[in-house]
Image (cartoon, helix red, strand yellow):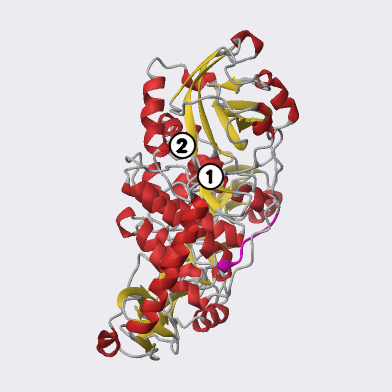
Amino acid sequence: MAVDLSSLRGSEITDRFHLTAVVSVGTTATLIDGVERSSGRAVTVRVLDPALCSDPDFAGRFSAALEPARALEHPNIAEVLATGIVSTSRGEAGYVITEALTGGSLRDLLDRGRLLSPSQALTLGLDICRALHLAHSRGLVHTELTPSKIMFGEEGRARLVDLGLADLLGRSAWREPSSLDNHVVRYSAPEQALGRVPAPAIDIYALGLVLVEAVTGSVPFDAGSTVATLAQRVDRLMPASADLGPLAAVLEHAARPEADERWTAEEFHHALVALAPRLPRPEALPLATRTIAGRMTAEIAAAEPSRGRSAPDPSDSGVTGASSHDSSTGSATDADAVAEAPRGRRRPPWLLPLASGSTVVLAALLVRLLLVTPIHVVPDLRGVSEAEAVNTITPFGWVTERLLDRSDEVPTPGGIISTSPAAGAELAEGEPFIYVVSEGPTLRAVPDTTGSLVTDAEAALATIGLTSFVEPVHDESVPVDLVVDWVATDDPTVVAGTPVEPGTAVTLRVSIGPAPRTVPDLSGLLAGPARARLVDLGLVFAEVEGDFDDEVEAGVIVSQVPEAGDPVERGTTVTVTVSRGPDVVVFPTLAEGVIFADARATLIEAGFEVELVLGAVDAIVSEVLIDGVPPEEDGVYPRGTRVDIVAV
């Protein structure tokens, strides 16, 4: 948790900056409004959490990281006025003092539900590309370019903030990516997820995603968690969005998964410049400007001693001492003068005379240009081949720049899409002239037709100019006429959202239902194993009782319908006939003293044939034989076995 620095209100850092109000306390830093005493200029003081500065070598690393950033001077990079180490009640902490940016951040704008038009996003992209071009040329990589790192001044101009600081604080965190907050990872390049050394290309990737979110309201590949988000973007092209309009192709190029395929900051800038004529003039951003509490007021002026004041007592505030890289020196300003100092940046005393002199010089140069430099009318080169266009404009002496883009209106590669200035404009020799050459028609994002009706899938592909072929396939789970999956016919690496040229062939694999089954041979199997085989094949088992069979034991399958080898659909019923085995009967128990007539009736009912070999019908049975041998009690015999009886 960040240190509570609310006690710093009314304190000073290096006698140059007066702290007026704590704005916010975050997990890594405390933001404080302040004022530069000598000019009355509002500043923002960022004091890092002392826990982040506890390493013995932090001061050295802090200085090494911030000094190059502080040396940058660019209208689209937040001006760093001073850096150093300040002592707090919780230990030493690094601080960075920058110009106050009261227009808020791009994150603030998006969180208020305000999206940018493609024209506004293009203008913002130009500003940040210029900032990145300078930073990258000086060996600096931002490493954490998010909407929160793009802030606006009171006049509405965008600035890139935290150059140097973001890299310093982020390096240790990237050693364990799963510990990073998802709001940072949402804009991280694939190579950061793979642990590679930060390079300028990661800033280009991040800026591409930031601009996509600024227009559409969503970040590509955001999976909701750090690990999932990092995994989503490795080896995947950014899906195009219709909301981006002409920006889509430029931003897709910036957010390529392979770092060496992305624009440089300069190339990104040129691509946006070439695109500008195709978009309407942007409206001003709806910024909510924050009033800086504690500009130089009477209260501060009253606390300001007159010139020659003694150094402040550290015990009077939460700041117990500070060292700074701020090299400003000189006497303090008069309290009254300080109190009346204007807000914002003070105009240097030499600026007004210089501006007046420059106006005269520029006017003279302009007159000379109009009188001496030839002017030519820009011809209409739209649709003309590049070779013909170059031959046409070469005599005009313009400084030409060639850019590449795609266009459905000029789909032939090598044709001229547009020029800047446009046809009919007047352009003097030596002036810059940009022409955009077609790389072919606008790429189409392949839609995911999986699970769609084949007719709907074909229509969706035809609508964006793609060709479809249907490949019938058997599938166990996908209903008939639905798309099981698809593949780009000539490039199996294409996935949903991949930009492809019109005319690209897509093969739709469409379900024709489950594959037919071949009925297995079940003869000789018992019913249980036979049922299991049919269930495994998706067939239904049915059983009927067959005849007695002296050769086949009971329960064994003797026949089936359909027959073995027949092709059938899944779910077909296979009916099997099961043998009842041999037809046998059990020899019954005959009562003691039974007469022949009763014994014969009992045996015939049990399934035997009876023969009286000796005696009378009403005589008592004295002997019973089967094949000359007395039968076994409860013995089993084939039905119809002959029983010989003697009755006396």
Q: Which of 89 and 527 is in front in this view?
A: 89
Q: Which contiguous range is marked in magenta? A: 113-119
Q: Which of 634 and 408 is in front in this view?
A: 408
Q: In this view, does 284 lie to the left or right of 166?
A: right
Q: What residue type is labelled 2?
A: Ala
Q: Is mark 1 on a helix, strand or loop?
A: helix
Q: Is residue 369 above or below residue 378?
A: above
In the rendered structure, find residue 366 and report the number of the disc placed on it: none
Q: Position of residue 236 (x, y in %)?
A: 41, 57
- Label 2, residues with CA under 10 Å away: few <14, some 14-19, many ≥20: some
Residue linked to disc 1: 149
Q: Which of 196 and 211 is in front in this view?
A: 211
When asked about the image quadrant of residue 245, the answer is bottom right
Q: Position of residue 503 (x, y in %)?
A: 40, 83
Answer yes or no: is residue 525 visible. no
Q: What residue type is labelled 1?
A: Lys
Residue linked to disc 2: 166
Answer yes or no: is residue 105 visible. yes
Q: Residue at x 37, y 22 (%)?
A: 60
First reached walking from the N terminus: tag 1 or tag 2: 1
Q: Do the residues labelled 1 and 2 touch (CB within 8 Å)?
A: yes
